[in-house]
Amino acid sequence: MSQSTASENTILVRFQMTPNPRAFKTIVNAPLKMSGNASFKLADKEYCQLPLVVELLSLSGVENLYIFENCATLTFDDPAEFSKNKKNIESIFKTRMTVHDPNFKTKEEIEKSDSVQIEKARRNSLTPELEQIENILDRTVRPGLQADGGDIEIVEYHNNELIIAYKGACGSCPSSTMGTLQAIQGILQDEFNPDIVVTPQIEDDFDF
């Protein structure tokens, strides 16, 4: 795998708030992950081989790290920890991006091969109902959630009940079970099935 050719002086880092008061999105001008996404919990730093991930997880108060494209969302146990660690976060990105490999694969991706092909295969195997739901979510909900450092995944659809799993910043966000959930349900009731009920399920972190 090839590593980044970026230098400390070329790495730009900016921070962005998310709807979750405990989650903070970091955007850099270089790819963090070329395909798919990855979520890391605190215990992963014991065997993770990515210096960038290990050092971010080692910061005080960090509970979860979610990586997607050129964005990383850090979730803290206390919002005040972000302010304390802001300079350290910037420093970690500037120094560790020089050796970071954006082509890294999670354990799940390695076991199941390329994540893009997996998603294509999954979409091709969906029932017409689930395919319609996914298309509606792609068009209406996912762009906003991804912009805020999160996402949703369909777990199951049965007897008019849709179970979804929140990812990234959405996982511990108070609005996930309030406004966001109601919006998702309202959209699907309007465009898919007036009797559909959407239920959240907190997704477990990926193992690495």
Image: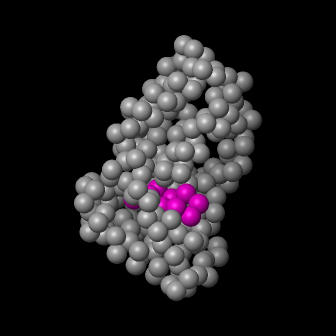
Determine the residue positioned at 56% across, 64% down. 70
Q: Position of residue 85 (x, y in %)?
A: 30, 69
Front-lying residue, 108 or 188 = 188
- Coloring applied to the structure: one colour
Please identify the dominant SS of the magenta region.
strand
Q: Residue furthest right?
A: 124
Residue 45 showing in the rendered view: yes
Q: Is residue 69 magenta?
A: yes
Determine the residue positioned at 57% across, 26% down. 187
Give the quarter of the figure containing the N terminus.
bottom right
Residue 4, compared with residue 40, is above or below; it is below
Front-lying residue, 49 or 132 = 132
Q: Position of residue 15 (x, y in %)?
A: 43, 65
Q: Where is residue 195 in the image (x, y as percent from the top left)?
A: 54, 13
Q: In which quarter of the image is residue 46?
A: bottom left
Q: Position of residue 97 (x, y in %)?
A: 51, 76
Residue 126, compared with residue 51, is above or below; it is above
Residue 27, compared with residue 125, is above or below; it is below
In this rendering, position of residue 83 left or right of residue 187? left
Residue 12, compared with residue 193, is above or below; it is below
Give the magenta-colored segment's residue range: 66-74
Residue 65 showing in the rendered view: no
In this rendering, position of residue 192 left or right of residue 76? right
Front-lying residue, 2 or 141 = 141
